[in-house]
Amino acid sequence: MTHSEDPNPTLNALAGHYKSIIHLLGEDPEREGLLKTPERVAKAMQFLTKGYDESPEEVLASAMFLEEGYKQMVIVKDIDFFSLCEHHLLPFFGKAHVAYIPNKYITGLSKIPRVVDIFARRLQIQERMTLQIKECIQKTLNPLGVMVVIEAQHMCMQMRGVSKQNSLTTTSDFTGFFQQAKTREEFMNLIKK
Ligand SMILES: [Zn+2]
């Protein structure tokens, strides 16, 4: 063979580890239903953590434009996201709501969900994800204020019986104008179902 080099060494190494894990969990990785599982899991995990290779700042900046007149709140709500908790590698998922008050610059509305997605597709904790989305928008668009609210269900709590089924964990973080309770209230009222 002239091309003996492994085209995807990381994927194959991951698959090898998952094969060991399946065996250590007491299963037979050679039985038919599990034969392709290590490779499938490796691919799934690479997809679920692909946010490491993407720059959320670049995504925002790519559609940033000058809009001096608009000083009202821009809200993108009910952004679905799926992440993995870094303590158990189990999913946590839910909705993110983002608001900012422009200071000359705005960004394309579709870019905010992209930013949420990039931070979600990393090993995360909900509190840090909330903070990172806030900081990314503050740093890139330099708005008069930004606020992020995340509501999520954590499978590591629900599946292990640590908390009641369907209980939601809510986190929020904000800067600038959102330090005023009135501004936060306006946003919270607008995202209510
Ligand atoms: Zn966890």
Image (tube, rainbow, N blue to C red):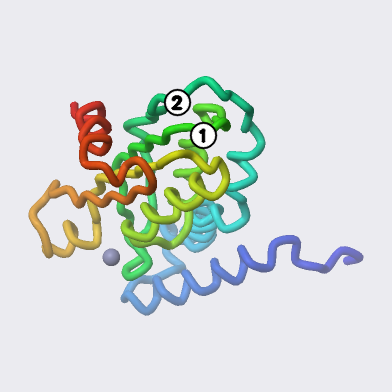
Image quarter where the C terminus lies is top left
Q: Position of residue 155 (x, y in %)?
A: 24, 56
Local crowd size for mark 2, using a 10 Å CA cut-off: few (<14), some (14–19), many (≥20)? some
Quickly name the residue at label 2: 71
Against 160, residue 167 (above or below) is: above
Image quarter where the N terminus lies is bottom right
Q: Are marks 2 and 1 in contact (CB under 8 Å)?
A: no
Quickly name the residue at label 1: 103
Which quarter is ligand 1 in? bottom left
Local crowd size for mark 1, using a 10 Å CA cut-off: few (<14), some (14–19), many (≥20)? some
Q: Position of residue 14 (x, y in %)?
A: 55, 68
Res 189 quadrant in image: top left
Amino acid at the residue labelled 2: Lys
Could you say whether the residue bearing mark 1 is in a helix, strand or loop?
A: loop
Please identify the residue farthest to the left as the structure is shown.
164
Give the left or right position of residue 45, taking residue 173 as reference: right
Q: Earlier in the sequence, mark 2 or mark 1?
A: 2
Residue plotted at (45% across, 26% down): 71
Name the foreground residue: 46 vs 84: 84
Amino acid at the residue labelled 1: Asn
Against 177, residue 139 (above or below) is: below
Q: Position of residue 158 (x, y in %)?
A: 17, 57
Question: Which numbered circle lies on residue 115?
Answer: none
Give the left or right position of residue 147, taking residue 142 as reference: left
Q: Position of residue 134 (x, y in %)?
A: 42, 49
Could you say whether the residue bearing mark 2 is in a helix, strand or loop?
A: loop
Mark-to-mark CA distance, 2 and 1: 7 Å
Res 177 quadrant in image: top left
Residue plotted at (32% across, 42% down): 178
Name the foreground residue: 164 vs 130: 130
Name the foreground residue: 5 vs 68: 68
